[in-house]
Image (cartoon, helix red, strand yellow):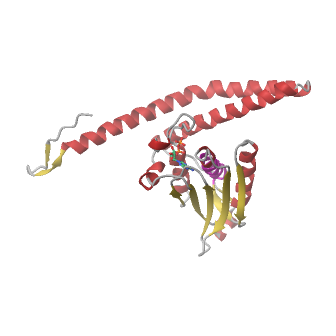
């Protein structure tokens, strides 16, 4: 990139800076806008065909079940799981374009966070042959928020924990209550590649991926954590990471515990 430096003056003609940075930022912004536009278009285009594919596999699955055709059932079930992965990706792409142009919609209710975590761990475990997901500790706690969106956050953290620990096979999950009893905390811990300090804050930015980890098996769009942070922030919570390279990472999601008032209004 060729960068020029020319002085920038204020209305009185006083030099207040250089144009180099301004141009640098606008180029980055333009690139991001183009990526956003492409993602929005591509995700809308992909949604319809993949949804009908999913429908067809389900019709076939029902038919083969009637015929007790084990081979076909097994293959179709695998197909179904891959289709679900694609649908999740497309939905993430759609989420990003919604966040960039407006706001995601939230349907809030009071619900048991521990029960949701349990349910999601079971679902993810069922689809995972490589890793064992252990719930180490679980406090029973209610929060006020969009259950599906929280589910999406936890699925994302588990999927990352699995993806970024190719040489370890355990993931641990905890649901805690912080010492002042105001917040619930979900922690997802892996023993994988870890994240160097310089990258730790940046991974929540959209499209950001850690360079050194990039290889053919660890691909991604770099939007999962960006969406997670957006969802958690809209619930007055926060998401943080503690990590050491080659040792592993812990992602912690903190959410306010449902107050009495919210419980009564439900
Ligand atoms: P993606 O996984 O599609 O790249 P994310 O937004 O989910 O996008 O994550 C951004 C980046 O953060 C990843 O590319 C990866 O470098 C890093 N990362 C996320 N979770 C983990 C983890 N559990 N262990 C190590 N690195 C991680």
Against 66, residue 145 (above or below) is below
In the image: residue 228, left or right of residue 199: right
Tell me: 174 left or right of 214.
Answer: right
Decide which of 136, 12 is in the foreground and name it: 136
The image quadrant that residue 145 belongs to is bottom right
Residue 232: x and y, percent? 55, 55
Residue at the location (72% across, 66% down)? Answer: 140
- At a point 59% along the width and 36% down the height, the residue shown is 89
Percent x, y for residue 108?
63, 55
Question: In terms of depth relative to the viewer, which is nearer, 95 or 260?
Answer: 95
Q: Is residue 112 visible?
A: no
Image position, residue 174 (x, y; %): 67, 62
Whether residue 202 is visible here, answered yes or no, is: yes
In the depicted structure, whether residue 34 falls above or below residue 241: above
Residue drawn 73% across and 41% down?
127
Give me the residue at 50% from left, 32% from top. 40
Which quadrant does the N terminus fall into? top left
56 relative to 187 in the view: left or right: right
Residue 218 in the image: above or below residue 105: above
Residue that extends furthest to the bottom in the rendered view of this protein: 180
- Count up the numbered dots: 0
Q: Nearer the viewer, residue 63 or 163?
A: 163
Give the quadrant of the C terminus.
bottom right
Q: Quadrant of residue 220?
A: top right
> Residue 80 falls in which quadrant of the image?
top right
Main secondary structure along the magenta-highlighted residues = helix
The part of the chain drawn in magenta is 146-160
Q: Is residue 129 above or below residue 74?
A: below
Work out which residue is located at the far right of the displayed protein and give it: 67
x%, y% of residue 181?
62, 73
Whether residue 119 appears in magenta in the rendering, the answer is no
């Amino acid at each position: 990139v060729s960068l020029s430096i020319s002085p920038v003056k204020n209305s009185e003609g006083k030099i207040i800076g250089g144009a180099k940075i301004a141009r640098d930022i606008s180029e980055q912004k333009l690139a991001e806008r183009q990526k956003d536009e492409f993602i929005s278009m591509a995700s809308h285009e992909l949604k319809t065909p993949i949804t009908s594919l999913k429908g067809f596999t389900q019709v076939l699955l029902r038919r083969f079940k009637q015929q007790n055709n084990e081979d076909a059932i097994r293959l179709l079930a695998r197909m179904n799981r891959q289709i679900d992965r694609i649908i999740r990706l497309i939905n993430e792409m759609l989420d990003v374009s919604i966040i960039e142009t407006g706001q995601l919609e939230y349907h809030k209710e009071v619900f048991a966070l521990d029960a949701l975590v349990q349910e999601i761990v079971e679902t993810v475990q069922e689809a995972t042959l490589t890793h064992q997901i252990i719930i180490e500790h679980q406090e029973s706690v209610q929060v006020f928020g969009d259950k599906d969106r929280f589910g999406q956050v936890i699925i994302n953290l588990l999927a990352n924990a699995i993806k970024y620990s190719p040489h370890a096979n355990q993931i641990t999950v905890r649901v805690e209550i912080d010492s002042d009893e105001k917040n619930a905390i979900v922690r997802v811990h892996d023993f994988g590649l870890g994240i160097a300090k310089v990258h730790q804050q940046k991974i929540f930015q959209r499209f950001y991926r850690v360079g050194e980890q990039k290889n053919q098996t660890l691909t991604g769009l770099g939007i999962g954590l960006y969406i997670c942070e957006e969802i958690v922030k809209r619930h007055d919570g926060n998401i943080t990471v503690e990590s050491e390279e080659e040792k592993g990472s812990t992602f912690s999601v903190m959410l306010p515990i449902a107050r009495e008032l919210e419980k009564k209004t439900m």
